[in-house]
Image (cartoon, rainbow, N blue to C red):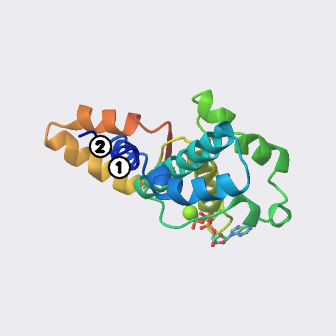
Amino acid sequence: MSVPIYERVHHNLKRLKLMTIDSLVDDHLEIAAKEKRTTLEVLDYLLDQERKSHEDRALGIRMRLSGFPMEKRLDDFDMSFQPSLDPTVIRDLASLRFIHHAENVVFLGPPGVGKTHLALSLGSEAIKQGIRVYFVNASNLIERLEKASHDKRLEERLKALNKFPLLIVDEMG
Ligand SMILES: Nc1ncnc2c1ncn2[C@@H]1O[C@H](COP(=O)(O)OP(=O)(O)OP(=O)(O)O)[C@@H](O)[C@H]1O
Ligand SMILES: [Mg+2]
């Protein structure tokens, strides 16, 4: 006897790991019937929800792997507080062009002026754009690289770091 269509649909959704559609499809088909939605509209809605949850999960993973000590937002950075800082430069950095061009950015200044805040908030923007980011303190980085070198795994470690298009090295001073 063939498998009933309802079971086959859910079986296939699970096998294809389309878990969001799997959880939404029953309710959504009822709503769609009431609202007389077309098949294409139903498909569009379900696929869009699946894509969003995939992206949210990937964003969460990038965030967890980033090693950020805290979250900082560019919107919370008060430009007027730092007259020596040109807002145009910050806006340009926020475009993340520097990452695509593989350019280095250095924030120099006395303690407490927002260097880490700016670095973390640009990092957050990059993570939101789908870019992998890794945050590390300079002393930690050196320590880890020294250990890797001692264990004859320096190349491997550098390769792993190279997978992050944006590496934030804090506390260079
Ligand atoms: N212009 C600013 N607008 C909003 N918050 C700021 C600003 N400058 C600094 N802060 C806040 O002040 C605190 C200290 O800033 P931050 O840690 O970024 O300084 P820093 O330049 O990295 O200092 P350090 O050299 O000691 O590491 C943080 O909580 C940060 O969010
Ligand atoms: Mg700092």
- Measured from the top left, where is residue 71 in percent x and y? 57, 65
Whether tag 2 and tag 1 are in contact, CB under 8 A, the answer is yes
Quadrant hosting ligand 1: bottom right
Q: Residue at x 20, y 40 (%)?
A: 149
Q: Residue at x 82, y 60 (%)?
A: 79
Q: What's the amino acid at mark 1?
A: Glu
Q: Amino acid at mark 2?
A: Val
Q: Residue furthest toward the left? A: 151
Whether residue 112 is situated above or below residue 158 in the rendered picture: below
Question: How many numbered marks have been drawn onto this rendered protein structure?
Answer: 2
Crowd rating for badge 2 (residues with CA inside 10 Å; few <14, some 14–19, many 20+): few
In this rendering, position of residue 98 left or right of residue 2 = right
Q: Which mark is residue 3?
A: 2
Residue marked by disc 1: 7
Locate residue 6, reporting x and y percent.
Answer: 40, 49
**Secondary structure type for disc 2:** loop
For the residues marked 2 and 1, what is the alpha-carbon distance in whole angstroms?
7 Å
